[in-house]
Amino acid sequence: MDISDLLATMASERASDLYLSHGAPPAIVVAGVQRFIGDKVLTPIDTHAIAYSVMNDRQQKDFESTLEMNLGIAPAGIGRFRVNIYRQRNEVAIAIRYITTEIPSIDTLRLPPTLRDLVMLPRGLILVVGATGSGKSTTLASMLDYRNRNRAGHILTIEDPVEYLHEHHQSIIDQREVGIDTLSYANALRNAMREAPNVIMIGEIRDRETMQQAIAYAETGHLCLSTLHANNANQTLDRILNFFPDTARHQLLIDLSLNLKAVVSQRLLHAVDRTRVPAVELLLVTAYISDLIEKGEIATIREAMKQNSEVGMQTFDQALYALYAAGTIGYAEALEHADSRTDLALQIRLQGPAPHESARGVIDGSNAPLSLQLGK
């Protein structure tokens, strides 16, 4: 089986993901819906051959040693792809993400306009968080592209792998890929300051050392952006704290209160028009939020966000209600992604159903009674 044909199918159908696992045909994901392509069931020989066809000798040796491999490929005339090769049931499996070369704008992605202001800040730490596949990398790329087009400077990215290819506009933007342009995240992070960037983007914060470097960049007058696997702002702060021993907690809270500027949390939802739309929780570190972080009062932050919507903050449930009220998402989709289904269902009941659903009786009829939405 030729990998080029599969990648061409991904590109032509605008599939976000391709899964290759023995015992099943190749599967693609289009607009969040997975389906098989063709009837040929992959064998272990197929997946092994495809995996080794995209790795060079060094990558093959690394894969055989670690049983994991992440890399980027860009076959001519097709596009750019992020490839993860791994083992399951003692055989090789592959997950491939299609990376569009066109960087969508903040407006095109239907992201909060506040992100434009955040990425133009002179210094600080901005974290974009969410589950795998929630669009974190795309959001970061759109923010960097906005800065690149609107302010001169030097933007440095450290990625594993590079996902979007940026062109130089008003800024010089240098992209370093781990394994190709640098031996490791650690090496690239240690040398980043010598490259005199104004903005540093770290592809993902996975450990304490990377978190320390991100804070250090912000402390020394740089704008640092990165991603983290977390579901919301509260969980993000808890996860950062868990990177460090308890003895470092006090100083860490002070450092975060002084340097963290925002946590952008997002989830990708199915819109009523069959596209995908992000629901975005936005924590802006105002003086009040900074004080809460310094005191370690993490549990109170969500309520503070809810009460400070006038400055641009919003919780997930507020974002979901706004999308629902605008007719962008349906009732069931809103509740499925809510932090508190009870509160969101009650708000919808009190405010009244969105026009696109009221006629169908979705709220007041038997399809989704409030009593069925309790318990979260």
Image (cartoon, rainbow, N blue to C red):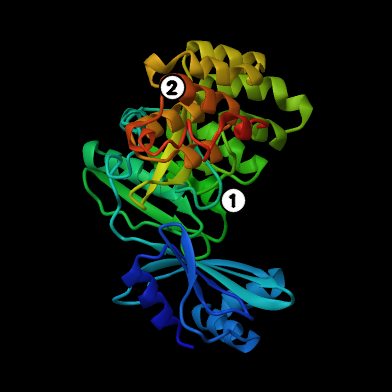
Could you tell me residue 177's position as x and y percent?
46, 59
What residue does disc 2 label?
A: 313
The residue that appears at 59% across and 50% down in the rendered structure is 186
The residue that appears at 48% across and 37% down in the rendered structure is 334
What's under tag 2, amino acid-wise?
Answer: Met
- The CA span between labels 1 and 2 is 34 Å
Q: Is residue 337 visible?
A: no
What's under tag 1, amino acid-wise?
Answer: Ala
Front one among 277 and 100: 277
Horizontal side of 296 relative to 78 (left or right) equals right
Task: Point out which mark residue 257 bears.
Answer: none
Horizontal side of 252 relative to 53 (left or right) equals right
Could you tell me residue 203's position as x and y percent?
49, 49
Residue 32 against residue 237 in the figure, above or below: below
Q: Quadrant of the C terminus?
A: top right
Helix, strand or loop at mark 1:
helix
Disc 1 versus disc 2: nearer the observer:
2
Horizontal side of 208 relative to 318 (left or right) equals right
Task: Point out which mark residue 186 bears.
Answer: 1
Front one among 300 and 190: 300
Earlier along the polypeptide chain: callout 1 or callout 2? 1
Q: Is residue 89 visible?
A: yes
Front one among 197 and 64: 64
Residue 329 against residue 182 in the figure, above or below: above
Horizontal side of 345 relative to 98 (left or right) equals right
Residue at the extreme front of the image, as rendered: 366
Q: Quadrant of residue 70?
A: bottom right
- Graded by Cα atoms within 10 Å as few (under 14), some (14 to 19) or many (20 or more), the crowding at tag 1 reads some
